[in-house]
Amino acid sequence: NADPQKTAFLLRKRWTLYSVTPLYKFSDAHLRDYGRLLSAFIAAEKQKGLAVEIGVELDIKVAVSCLPDLKGSDHDQAAILVQLLSRSPAFSKNSEDKLIWSGWFCCVSGDDLPENVPEDFTCLPLFLANGAESYTSIVGSWFQKTFDCCFRRLAISPLSLSWMAAMWTGCKVDKTPSAIELIFSVPCLPQPLDISYAIHPEDAKALWDTVQKTPGEITQEEVDVFMDCLYSHFHRHFKIHLSATRLVKVSTSIASAHCDGTIKFLQSQYLTGVLMLLTELAISQIQ
Amino acid sequence: HLATSLPLPSERDHLRPRIDMIVFMCDIKSKYSLKNVEACLAHVDASFFLGKVCFLVTGVGRVNYSSVEVNAIWKLGEVYCSPVLFCELELDGIRVATAQRLLRMLQICAGHVPGVSALCFSSLMRHSADD
């Protein structure tokens, strides 16, 4: 399990998710070289006039490192972190570089790793980015060109979000848990309408505990029963069938996920668990 | 004839022509539509399930919007011995092709195609389940 101190910087940031096809001829022994090459690529892109921020002259430094603790099993490739740091004149007094963008590749697959992966290919199916979209695009292009891989935004379906809601409701947290919040988008209306349903965490957990039969195991039926109970409760009060709407966001004390493919990790002890679910989604999007 | 739920209102029974086929439509983006279909099935006479019922699943073009598990629908088709068709209403080509297919099935169910009866659909279902 990952050391909470080392992974604390991953928490409480909103990460945009991508699925990545296997990287060809990638080696974690050459991370510093990759950093230099990517740095040169970014500088070249800026010369071409694809300046990311107009009027701001940023000298960008690239740091590529390994996060050895972030993996599911020994078969998994260790996570790779890419950070873009800037050293602009305004900060020259304080010689610390400012972090302007981060992205990391990971594979937390537990026991069922992708099989039949040919030699020379590295599986890091999940990519998480935080920072300006323009930087994500440049870094993504470099990786795609260099390792012949393909990035795609990871979408999270309402089915997967329900699964997350049920799974995360059942998790124990040390501090006072925050409310479970579900956001639904109502279809077929001239004006967009979102419904926010907040549930007291203890009530939600009590409900989940009555539904879940085997601790540590979750079935689709249990998730369905849990969600149906929440929907009936809502219908009783508001006469609205949430089951006819689309679940778009789930927020719990563990993490918060949006259907557009963004995630926020809130508890380091469950980081690996959430990554395992996301890795699975990424792998199924690739296939 | 389109209805949002069953049973059909009894006031118009005497005006209604014979029903040859029932297509239950379920939107994969709405769990509610599946629940509605499941509730309506109870109101259908058993004789319809000899090839005169089929399930039509719409909205399959947007996989990322699914609120219904496809397995649940397959199971429904199995339990009621009726075929399950998938289509995306927003795509012209698929919509037209599906309509033509349903029309063909309807012709068979109404007895307009000599030598083929609705019972053929049921036996086709059993064969694919055995595979």
Image (cartoon, rainbow, N blue to C red):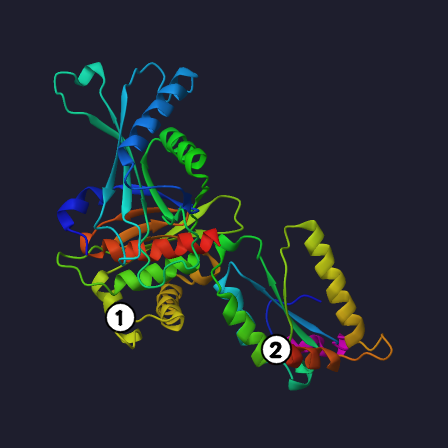
Mark 1 secondary-structure assignment: loop
Kindly identify which residue carries mark 1: A216
Count of residue discs: 2
Callout 2: chain: B
Choose top left, top right, bottom left or bottom right for residue A53: top left
Q: What is the CA distance from the residue labelled 1 to the residue labelled 2?
A: 35 Å
Report if residue B105 lies within the magenta region.
no
Choose top left, top right, bottom left or bottom right for residue B2: bottom right
Report if residue B9 lies within the magenta region.
yes
Does residue A282 appear left or right of residue B117 in this picture? left
Callout 1: chain: A
Disc 2 marks a residue whose amino acid type is Asp
Give residue A68's position: percent from left, percent from top: 22, 48
Q: Of the numbered discs in the image, which one, if any, rests on residue B128?
A: none
Image height check: is A276 above or below B115?
Answer: above
Mark 2 secondary-structure assignment: loop
Bounds of the magenta segment: B8-19
- Give B74 or A181, whichever is nearer the viewer: B74
Q: Residues within 10 Å of mark 1 (few under 14, many from 20)?
A: few
Q: Residue at x 50, y 61 (%)?
A: B30
Give residue B21's position: percent from left, percent from top: 72, 74
Kindly identify which residue carries mark 2: B131
Does residue A161 appear left or right of residue B107 in this picture? left
Q: Residue at x 58, y 53 (%)?
A: B61
